[in-house]
Image (spheres, helix red, strand yellow):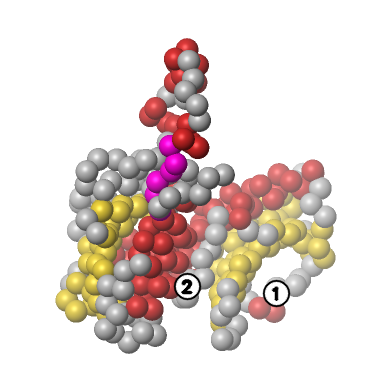
Amino acid sequence: MTRNPEPGTRNRRSLHGPRRPMALWACFLLLFPAGCARPQPVSDGRGPRSWPVTAVEEVNALITELGRHPAFTFEVGFCDPRKTARASVSVSDSEDPRDPRVREFRPGVHGAGPWVGRHILPLALREGFTTASRGELYFRCVLDGRTWLAYSRGPAEARYAAGALGLGGIGRELTGGAVDSPDVEPWPRQDQDVGAELAITPELGGVLRAAKEKYDAKRSELVRRFNRSYLFYAPARDMPWRLRSAGDRLFADTHCSDRMYAARFRVEFAADGKGGWTYRRLLAAEEFKGE
């Protein structure tokens, strides 16, 4: 594949190839309507740029561009105009180079050092934002006259990004009115290895699918209640899973970790007396591993 000459652009010749007859292009447009074929591009203020290969590439191009600027300002806020919390963060190389904090000077106005710009912000963007769809939060930054826009990928990602960046005002508005589910409980360490591990057979595949759906449905709450680090709780499709059983209980377990923290999750089912399984609760824990 031809390497892009600069972030966010593509070589037009390698992308489109030689010219094709118009009839072939007409067939292509019928099969792939313009409204659903591609994500929205980032604007440079002079009209849309060339389309990215993927939304992931576009976010990576933004991260690369941020790395070229020792000082810049970005804004995070709600796409819904009824929600008023906004945060403007000025990243400066004059601050402590290893300070990971985003400090609030007054409501909505923040400052941060290069550690935030080089490490924490790229992590929040990579895990939490996309250019493919409009989410709950927006990220906006102007670099060399070009406006970069990205949006949170989902409720869990929005909460993760607000927490990782230390944007308390946005975090409070995101979680305002949230109620803890009674079926989501802390997971005691002593219960971690209870039961025997099972092979994931076709008969148990339905239980595993139900466990993944339950985890995804609760992921935003899991971030809100248990995440106290930069560890990202990925969607179920990106997590490793195993099944265990103990008596009339069946457990679907998964976990994630980084260099300093680890989190584990268990979706518990109980035998229904008819040869099937009924969801009972979801257990979760996050622990510090050490530096």
Nearer to me, 196 or 82: 82
SS for tag 1?
A: helix
N-terminal-most mark, 2 or 1: 1
Residue 110 locus on image (x, y percent): 23, 74
SS for tag 2?
A: loop
Amino acid type at mark 1: Asp
Q: What stretch is highlighted in magenta?
A: 7-12
Residue 16 located left or right of residue 191: left
Nearer to me, 57 or 208: 57
Q: Is residue 202 above or below residue 24?
A: below
Amino acid type at mark 2: Tyr
Mark 2, residue position: 230
Which quadrant holds residue 46? top left
> Which residue lies at the image location 27% right of the left edge and 72% below the top edge?
71
**Mark 2 to mark 1 CA distance (whole Å):** 25 Å
* Residue 41 in magenta stretch: no
> Which residue lies at the image location 68% right of the left edge and 59% below the top edge?
240
* Quarter in which the C terminus is drawn: bottom right
Q: Are marks 2 and 1 in contact (CB under 8 Å)?
A: no
Q: Label 2: few (<14), some or many (≥20) within 10 Å?
A: some
* Residue 8 in magenta stretch: yes
Q: Is residue 30 visible?
A: no
Nearer to me, 276 or 43: 43
> Which residue lies at the image location 19% right of the left edge and 79% below the top edge?
105
Nearer to me, 8 or 250: 8
Mark 1, residue position: 191
